[in-house]
Image (cartoon, grey):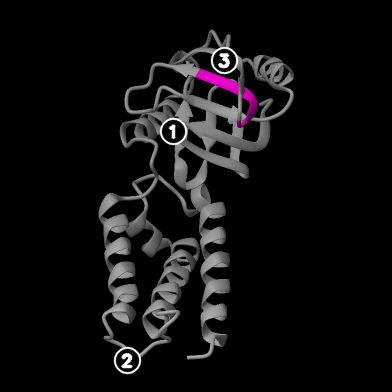
Amino acid sequence: MFEIEETGGANIGSARATWPFVKLLVNKNELQLNASILGNLHFKPSDIISIEPSTLLSGAGIKINHHVNGYNEKVIFLTSGSRDLIKRIENTGFLNNPDPIPAEVEARINNYQSSGSFPMKWPAVIAFIVIWNILFLGDLLGYFGKTNNHIPMGIGAQSALAFAFLFALATLLSEPFSQLVLKQGRKAKDIKSFLLFLMLITGVMFIMISIMPH
């Protein structure tokens, strides 16, 4: 099956993801726009009204006009050469596919659409935020002893950063843990770029705080 894959950025509603955090994949049965934590969007040919060039202050791209309930109306894949990309999408047969798509593909897409574009379970997100804030507030409230008066970061901040790093690592490597964090049918690879970025940022910040004079 002829298929194209592109790397770029995206605007989904008021949120924006930059290159290289977004993947566009198209074949004759499906269009996927994977913007990592920002959203995983899956479309059947019948879901698409049109695909047109788009020019924004944030960059050029293609606007995907659709009628999928639960997805944001504004879906833009940011890339150079938008007209050439639309032509390549047409060449996959996606925009003029007269045949019914395979039942298993339709079922999978319907499952993705019914759960919305955000890939994580909200209880997992809330639990992460609560634990993160409790650990960080520990320094400010003095639960972990005295910290630098000018930079109130110590064991609490280090614990919060270590927690975030291990949370991302476990989601990436442990299938049972990722099932607790991600919605049904989602895979860690769907948000791999976000998880790696989170590990990089928290790892660097942990090291910086560790070498600060206390």
Name which residue lies at 63% across and 25% down.
61
In the picture of the structure, the residue carrying the numbered disc 3 is 51
| Secondary element at image label 1 | loop
The three-letter code of the residue at mark 2 reads Gly
Image quarter of residue 154: bottom left
Circle 1 sits on which residue?
Answer: 14
**68 left or right of 6?**
left
Position above or below: 137 against 180: below
Does 46 appear above or below 173?
A: above
137 versus 104 height, above or below: below
Span of residues in magenta: 58-64
Q: Secondary structure at mark 3?
A: strand
Q: Which residue is mark 2?
A: 145
Cβ atoms at labels 3 and 2 below 8 Å apart: no
Residue 9 percent location from the top left of the image: 60, 37
Task: Give the mark nearer the N terminus: 3 vs 1.
Answer: 1
**Front of the two marks 3 and 2:** 2
Question: Does the magenta portion include 144?
Answer: no
Q: In the displayed structure, does residue 14 sit left or right of residue 139?
A: right
Mark 1 or 2, nearer chain start: 1
Label 3 is placed on what type of residue?
Answer: Ile
Most foreground residue, 93 or 40: 40
Residue 207 numbered tag: none
Q: For the residue carrying disc 2, how many other residues have a C-alpha within 10 Å: few (<14), some (14-19), or many (20+)?
A: few
Instruction: Give the x, y percent position of residue 125.
Output: 32, 56
State which tag comes first along the sequence, 3 or 2.
Answer: 3
Mark 3 → mark 2, Cα distance in angstroms: 58 Å
